[in-house]
């Protein structure tokens, strides 16, 4: 960017184009909320640290008293591990025993580092990946990470393949093809491994599709962990049978989400067949009720005039029975999504000590979802009832497409003009200016962290608005099917007297009060996730090449460390080979995030020709420890 008040231009037209192994732990190191355990300890075995995706560590050796001061930090870098690939390193590394595992961006290598030997590479697994997927994948060739269980590291490659690798030897255990990238489908989402309660002693690998921009309809699949065999497939659009809605077990709270076969009837003609609504965000799991939770992306095509109707089940939150795949409830967050708000942000299952009381009774089993559209939803996770949905923005102007969420109907109340038309509605051939938030969302895919110690969420946010118009798009199989022109710019000043403009904020959200506890402005977007720890600290990076820690109670900055390249990953915490706590975070950004960095480039000193080279442009895991 030339300066902080300039905008970022992004345009798409019609066709733009094993058992217990030595040094390894048992199957389940994640926590079950019903037992009161809500964080990780020595290891990190899934994207969110546990199956609920709280991104919270029970480790507290690194804390407010031991981290030192900004002037005299006691947290130091132990080493930085080269991944051998440049680009956006999303998700998290995993740590099992003394081994740290990294899945790189395309070509999706899996690298095992021995932390007991200063991070020496133990082995590298290089899968065969169809390069065609590189060309059809939207929005950067990232990988959002692997999962570990039963001696296997399991992850997706970009070309619609899930692979399981022996965590000790680096040899392939199985490989399952999910789709054909020539159709436009790719897979860059994280895997999640959950128990298969229909078959005790076995487990399921849950994966979702990407590329909702390619005229394909999204899906979620479950694979058997031991063999890779397909167990079930559930589509986002289509008939109730294909969406896996069983009338005898499907029970959404709101009437708007009840009618049969809405995955077809809420679309004009057969446009549901190109309905987008993919599942590339993070999936979470409630072990108490055997429920998976995830959100779907925007409906296809982006030009909303070309797809009249509510367009279900795009921009929706799903609750599915993991063992069978059957939908328990679906809540469409933004009907007829005209703004690319989608709903891919993670949804976190939480058990409340003090229930929320509504007309339908007390609610202690909740699901918390910070949506791109700017509203913070707290659901009853058994029924999908919205218990609260306030804005989590800095000022009222942070959201202008809708006024509020009607808790009775479950619908957003749009801001209308004198003729009853949405003021910020989008249409083909008409530029609608200053829509807030932008298509990047008030919060995107970047995971929040939840501290059960204080009942607080820590939410990475954007302060961005946009000008938007629809463009006519024609469907060509396997080609981009988007149709829009968008200009993104800095949003409203959170403090107009004197004014200051920032592109992001780190927000502490008091779940009990439903309000912002504190918020700290960030000059660059927070394009990665957050880690919260029992040591009363949060860790994250922003797109100004800085890794940070803040006081979780006050938001005060207590630690910074320069990175050679910004981060779009989520930090983790684990116990090192010496028994002491560590913090780790990726560095490395690609072309999309690079447009928002302080330099306006993917990484300082690198060029586009260096996308897969191991130069100084990023592609590292930085590991920090307390000074001796």
Image: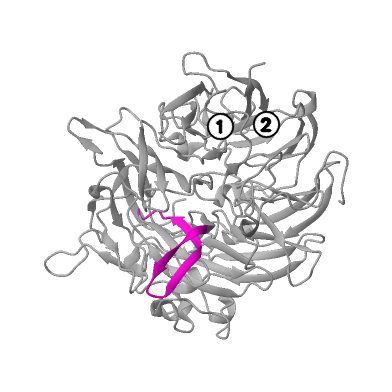
Nearer to the camera, 480 or 142: 142
Relative horizontal placement of residue 326, taking residue 595 as reference (left or right): right
Q: CA distance from mark 1 to mark 2?
A: 10 Å
For the residue carrying disc 1, how many other residues have a C-alpha within 10 Å: few (<14), some (14-19), or many (20+)? many
The earlier-in-sequence mark between 1 and 2 is 2
For the residue carrying disc 2, how many other residues have a C-alpha within 10 Å: few (<14), some (14-19), or many (20+)? many
Q: Position of residue 5 (x, y in %)?
A: 27, 33
Residue range of the region highlighted in magenta in the rendering: 352-374
Magenta residue check for 202: no
Q: Residue at x 44, y 37 (%)?
A: 526
The quarter of the picture where the C terminus appears is top right
Nearer to the camera, 585 or 176: 585
Q: Position of residue 162 (x, y in %)?
A: 71, 55
Q: Position of residue 301 (x, y in %)?
A: 41, 63
| Quadrant of res 250 | bottom right
Q: Is residue 616 above or below residue 438?
A: above
Residue identified by numbered label 1: 588
The quarter of the picture where the N terminus appears is top left
Relative horizontal placement of residue 499, taking residue 156 as reference (left or right): left
Prevalent SS, magenta region = strand
Asked whether the beta carbons under mark 1 and mark 2 sit within 8 Å of each other, the answer is yes
Q: Position of residue 464 (x, y in %)?
A: 32, 43
Residue furthest toward the front?
Answer: 354
Q: Secondary structure at mark 1?
A: loop
Residue identified by numbered label 2: 83
Q: Residue at x 49, y 28 (%)?
A: 548
How was this image coloured?
Answer: one colour
In this rendering, does residue 230 appear at all?
Answer: yes
Q: Residue at x 56, y 53 (%)?
A: 282
Residue 137's disc is none
Residue furthest toward the top?
Answer: 72
């Amino acid at each position: 960017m030339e300066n902080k008040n300039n905008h970022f231009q992004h345009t798409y037209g019609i066709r733009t184009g094993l058992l217990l192994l030595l040094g390894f732990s048992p199957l389940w190191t994640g926590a079950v909320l019903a037992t009161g355990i809500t964080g990780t300890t020595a290891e990190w075995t899934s994207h969110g640290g546990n199956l609920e995706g709280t991104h919270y560590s029970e480790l507290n050796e690194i804390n407010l008293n031991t981290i030192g001061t900004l002037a005299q930090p006691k947290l130091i870098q132990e080493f930085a591990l080269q991944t051998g690939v440049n680009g956006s390193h999303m998700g998290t590394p995993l740590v099992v025993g003394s081994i740290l595992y990294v899945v790189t961006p395309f070509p999706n290598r899996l690298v095992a580092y021995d932390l007991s030997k200063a991070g020496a590479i133990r082995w590298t697994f290089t899968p065969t990946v169809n390069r065609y997927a590189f060309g059809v994948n939207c929005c950067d060739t990232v990988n959002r990470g692997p999962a570990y269980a039963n001696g296997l590291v399991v992850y997706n490659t970009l070309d619609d393949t899930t692979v399981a690798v022996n965590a000790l030897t680096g040899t392939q255990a199985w490989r399952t093809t999910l789709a054909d990238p020539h159709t436009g489908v790719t897979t860059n989402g994280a895997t999640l491994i959950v128990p298969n309660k229909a078959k005790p002693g076995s487990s399921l690998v849950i994966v979702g599709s990407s590329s909702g921009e390619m005229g394909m309809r999204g899906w979620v699949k479950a694979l058997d962990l031991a063999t890779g065999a397909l167990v079930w497939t559930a589509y986002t659009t289509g008939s109730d049978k294909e969406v896996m809605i069983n009338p005898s077990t499907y029970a959404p709270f709101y009437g708007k989400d009840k009618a049969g076969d809405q995955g077809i009837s809420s679309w004009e003609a057969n446009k549901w067949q190109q309905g987008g609504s993919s599942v590339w965000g993070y999936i979470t799991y409630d072990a108490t009720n055997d429920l998976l939770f995830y959100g779907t992306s925007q409906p296809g095509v982006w030009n909303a005039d070309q797809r009249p109707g509510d367009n279900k089940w795009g921009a929706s939150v799903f609750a599915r029975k993991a063992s069978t795949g059957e939908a328990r409830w679906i809540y469409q967050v933004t009907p007829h999504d005209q703004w690319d708000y989608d709903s891919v942000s993670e949804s976190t299952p939480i058990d409340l000590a003090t229930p929320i009381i509504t007309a339908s009774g007390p609610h202690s089993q909740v699901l918390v979802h910070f949506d791109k559209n700017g509203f913070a939803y707290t659901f009853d996770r058994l029924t999908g009832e919205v218990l609260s949905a306030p804005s989590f923005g800095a000022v009222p102007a942070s959201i202008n497409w809708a006024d509020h969420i009607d808790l009775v109907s479950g619908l957003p109340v749009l801001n209308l003009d004198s003729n009853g038309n949405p003021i910020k509605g989008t249409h083909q051939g008409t530029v609608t200016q200053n829509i807030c938030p932008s298509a990047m969302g008030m919060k995107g895919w970047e995971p929040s962290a939840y501290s059960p110690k204080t009942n607080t969420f820590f939410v990475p946010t954007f302060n961005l608005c946009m000008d938007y118009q629809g463009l006519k798009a024609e469907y060509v199989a396997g080609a981009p099917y988007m149709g829009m022109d968008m200009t993104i710019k800095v949003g409203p000043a959170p403090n107009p007297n004197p004014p200051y403009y920032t592109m992001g904020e780190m927000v502490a959200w008091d779940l009990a009060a439903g309000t912002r506890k504190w918020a700290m402005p960030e000059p660059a977007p927070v394009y990665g996730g957050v880690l919260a720890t029992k040591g009363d600290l949060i860790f994250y990076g922003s797109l100004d090449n800085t890794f940070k820690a803040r006081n979780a109670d006050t938001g005060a900055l207590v630690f910074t460390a320069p990175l050679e390249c910004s981060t779009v990953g989520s930090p983790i915490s684990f116990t090192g080979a010496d028994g002491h706590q560590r913090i780790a975070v990726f560095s490395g950004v690609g072309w999309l995030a690079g447009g928002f960095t302080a330099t306006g480039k993917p990484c300082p000193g690198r060029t586009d020709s260096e996308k897969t080279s191991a130069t100084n442009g990023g592609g590292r895991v930085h590991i920090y420890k307390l000074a001796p």
